[in-house]
Image (cartoon, grey):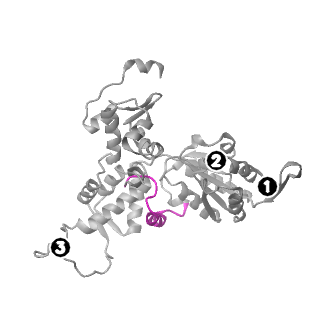
Amino acid sequence: PTMATERLLTPTTIAPEEEQINWSLRPTQITDYIGQADLIERLKIAMQASRQRADPMEHILLHGPPGLGKTTLAHVIANEMGSKVCITSGPALARPTDLVASLKRLSRGDILFIDEIHRLPIAIEEFIYPAMEDFRIDILLDSGIHARTVQIPCEPFTLIGATTRAGLLSAPLRSRFGLVHHLKYYSTDELLTILKRSCQLLNINHDGDAPLATIAARSRGTPRIANRLLRRVRDYAQVRGSGSSPSPVHPLTSSPVHKPPQAPVSTPTVITPDAVSAALKLESVDHLGLDDLDRTYLRTIATVYEGGPVGLEAVAATLNEDAGTLEDVVEPYLLQIGFLARTRRGRQLTRPAAEHLGLKWTPPAAESRLFE
């Protein structure tokens, strides 16, 4: 694991324990789903039309950065339609038998959710086309003159594909989705609403909206990060929020004085603006939601490569990070807030990024702009 995959602000899930907590915070009804208003309206219409026709919904492709609620939406849709959802991923469907096993578990109207669908093997794509169009799988038996095709029927179902890289999807696969939607980053107001709901579920009281607004502003437009920061702030407030000091040290042994175990805390934890500031400072998350990796990435371009342009592979090698990971979990937010420009010749630092780092900004060479 690298710094990019284990950091606090990664939009992907860090550990199975976090995934369990995430499930407890996720909405189950579409009326409880916050944000993505355009997509929710399209889904409401599609679900209502499907109910009226008594047919499964059209296949749905959801693409966008991780942590924005693609998996949650699949469960919400299944719950609203009274069906169940079978979750798998592109890499997990390595052989045709894997796909057949997943499809045969489905009843009429159920949902097959394929995460990272852009990583679906090409061989599996050929099998999934007839399943999406005609609800059957064509299996080729034997070879040569003895070759024959056996058709295996499957119940009419809805495929929901999720991807962070829609550009890597093949055109034939993409064209078979009736509803294609890009999930956008959340606004601070939307994240504030999500955090208020999470506080109710986690037994957290907040001193007005200010503490939650601060967390929302540093959550990089991503609900998963907002909820993770909220839990870190809650822990800090629970232990240090009332002015507690570190465990006292025994004067003779220089070891902490251990107190007997106490009953679990049942009273709500109160988070204040001071607790939020202190907790996020401890985690090195600044007022724009940037952490040490973001600042190191930007500073590397600024100092080692004189502001760029520089190729992603070169930056990745300097940081000893995977280029794909940097592209997926570091660059999207920096591009969104205008701290990074992506040109044909590579990554380019912008003036706001240099000012944020307290560095002198040098404009890129003028001659390169003519042909970009």
Q: Rate crowding at label 3 as few (under 14), some (14 to 19) or many (20 or more) other CA atoms within 10 Å.
A: few
Q: Position of residue 255 (x, y in %)?
A: 17, 73
Number of numbered markers: 3
Q: Amino acid at mark 2?
A: Leu
Q: Quadrant of the N terminus?
A: bottom left
The residue segment tinted magenta is 8-29
Q: Kindly tell me whether residue 177 is visible in this rendering.
A: no
Quadrant housing residue 267: bottom left
What's the distance in space between the residues labelled 3 and 2, CA to CA? 62 Å
Disc 2 is placed on an element classified as: strand
**Near-viewer residue (342 or 275):** 342
Quadrant housing residue 350: top left
- Along the polypeptide, which appears first: circle 1 or circle 3? 1
Q: Which residue is mark 2?
A: 179
What's the distance in space between the residues labelled 1 and 2, CA to CA? 28 Å
- Along the polypeptide, which appears first: circle 3 or circle 2? 2
Give the number of the mark in front: 1 or 2: 1
Q: Is residue 303 above or below residue 268?
A: above
Disc 1 is placed on an element classified as: strand
Residue furthest front in the image: 144
Q: Kindly tell me whether residue 54 is visible in this rendering.
A: yes
Q: Which residue is rendered at x = 44% and y = 49% of the image? A: 186
Please tell me whether residue 17 belongs to the stretch shown in magenta: yes
Q: Which residue is mark 3?
A: 255
Q: Position of residue 23 (x, y in %)?
A: 49, 65
Dots 3, 2 in contact, CB < 8 A: no
Q: Position of residue 160 (x, y in %)?
A: 63, 54
Q: Which residue is mark 1?
A: 139
- Along the polypeptide, which appears first: circle 1 or circle 2? 1
Dots 1, 2 in contact, CB < 8 A: no
